[in-house]
Amino acid sequence: MPRTHIIGAGLAGLATAVSLARHGGDVTVYEASGHAGGRCRSFFDAKLERTIDNGNHLLLSGNQATMCYLADIKATDSLIGPVPACFPFLDLRTGQRWRLRPNAGRVPWWILDSRRRVPDTKVWNYVSALRFSMAGTDTTVTDCVGDTGVLFERFWRPLAVGALNTPARAGAAQLLWSVLRETFAQGEAACRPRIPKRGLSAAFVEPALNSLPQMGATVRFGHRLRRISYTSRRVNGLDFGSKRIRLRDGEAVVLAVPPPAAAELVPALTVPDDTHAIVNVHFRLTSPAGLPPKLPLLGLIGGTAQWLFVRGDVASITVSAADALASEPAESIARKTWNDVAAELDQERDELPPYRIVKEKRATFAQTPNQVKRRPQTGTEFANLYLAGDWIDTGLPATIESAIRSGQMAARAIAGNGAAGASRA
Ligand SMILES: Cc1cc2nc3c(=O)[nH]c(=O)nc-3n(C[C@H](O)[C@H](O)[C@H](O)COP(=O)(O)OP(=O)(O)OC[C@H]3O[C@@H](n4cnc5c(N)ncnc54)[C@H](O)[C@@H]3O)c2cc1C
């Protein structure tokens, strides 16, 4: 297998490296910053005196690529969540609570059971879900399920906003269908919510950084790729400023950087060019809290906060598609979201605890039909240059699963194309 240079140590770059190195590939990863993980990382916050995540990340047990990656880096036990699958919700306007409880097997009889489905909905409300399977490239979520009604407010809207980080009226239906097809349509075992037990870095990043050297791979931090040099059909050099690498015949490059960085480095590359924000607020509580009924997550309807997660004495809320909220001052965001969750955590509403707000203004690309059409394939017009990242055309929303799958796709393309890539020089 040719030597491979991987640019970017986010999950896409790490997954590429792990996939290649475990099959004996000669791999070096170059990361611009001083840490790995990119948009999926933990850091120590001096104000809260706790290690927190840049944002809460929710996965589903049916995220196959992610589960394979975790197995490869020996971190399968780093995620937790309820078994059997259960999604607790609270409507902040009415106080009504429910738990979505999909059943085992592919036939979704849970929809027939009023105790397992969304309250105040009827069986036939769910039939519109079939339209996702026929969605075209221009179809939005609301084209499939409309934009009114209890099921929309309590299920389709939160699902679309959470999975696509895009308002439901603009979100690409085909992407939501891929989530439904790979998780909910497979039954309970594929749609168990999963969150990191100790944090994002402990789950996805540190085990990879520990495993890669053992597999013979190298990770270099503080290496920002500034320029790629090309012959007509190949990459033949990488310029990191203080260091330049001349590629030998047979060597490959995987660019696992965000879309704007890739567009600067590759001539005439079309990439998604619109983004949406995600805002997270982390509250340090006076004592460890648990959510009734002792699940680590809660979906919230009708407020500013959309999801609440609890780990020890840190309660964290997430707001996706949060461009307007992200422009508000920190204290206003903290107060609004604390008002939503204080009672649920058994805390005084008037006593705002210490908090940290993380505004990821370009959290993911805007997952609209037009932006989805701008996603490139893994291979490029240059024989030894490949792309990876959550924004590559994986058919999935821009998520951990997409990032990792894109890395595995790049690794497969290199393994399958090594000789061809070299001979086309
Ligand atoms: C707040 C937030 C919440 C999220 N919630 C969820 C969730 O609940 N569930 C879920 O599945 N997904 C979620 N996501 C999405 C998920 O984090 C991303 O899909 C995933 O981390 C993207 O990984 P990546 O490797 O494609 O890109 P990145 O993480 O952006 O990695 C790119 C890397 O390339 C490096 N780089 C850039 N330019 C250069 C250069 N020139 N040279 C060298 N290195 C360079 C960067 O420093 C970075 O480390 C969330 C994202 C955010 C921000």
Image: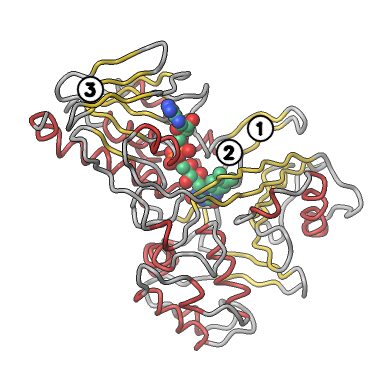
Question: In the image, what residue type sits under mark 3?
Answer: Asn
Q: Name the side, left or right, on which 380 lies relative to 7.
A: left
In the depicted view, which residue is nearer to us: 422 or 373?
Answer: 373
Question: In front here: 42 or 111?
Answer: 42
Vertical side of 285 occupied by 102: above or below: below
Q: Which x, y percent locates residue 61?
A: 44, 55
Q: Which residue is mark 2?
A: 199
Residue 331: percent from the left, percent from the top? 82, 45
Dot 1, how many residues are within 10 Å of its Cα: few (below 14), some (14-19), or many (20+)?
some
Could you tell me which residue is drawn at 39 percent across and 38 percent down?
263
Q: Is residue 196 visible?
A: no
The answer to whether 14 is drawn above or below residue 172 in the figure is above
Residue at 37% of width from left, 67% of height from top? 181
Name the residue: 39% across, 42% down: 389
Task: Look at the numbered discs 1 and 2 and tell me whether their residues touch, using CB distance below 8 Å.
Answer: yes
Q: Amino acid at mark 2?
A: Gly
Residue 94: in sight, yes or no? yes
- In the picture, residue 139 is in which quadrant? bottom left
**From the viewer's perspective, is 99 left or right of 330?**
left
Say which element carries label 1.
Answer: strand
Q: Earlier in the sequence, mark 3 or mark 2?
A: 2
Quarter-wise, where is residue 12 in the image?
A: top left
Question: For the residue marked with disc 1, what is the amino acid?
Answer: Thr
Residue bearing the label numbered 1: 51
Please rate how many residues cluster around mark 2, counting C-alpha atoms within 10 Å: few if below 14, some from 14 to 19, many from 20: many
Give the CA separation, mark 1 to mark 3: 41 Å
Q: Eyeballing the image, is 152 above or below 24?
A: below
Q: Which residue is mark 3?
A: 236
- Check disc 2 and report its element: helix, strand or loop: loop
Rendered image quadrant of residue 232: top left
Quadrant of image for the N terminus: top left
- Depth order, front residue of 362/194: 362
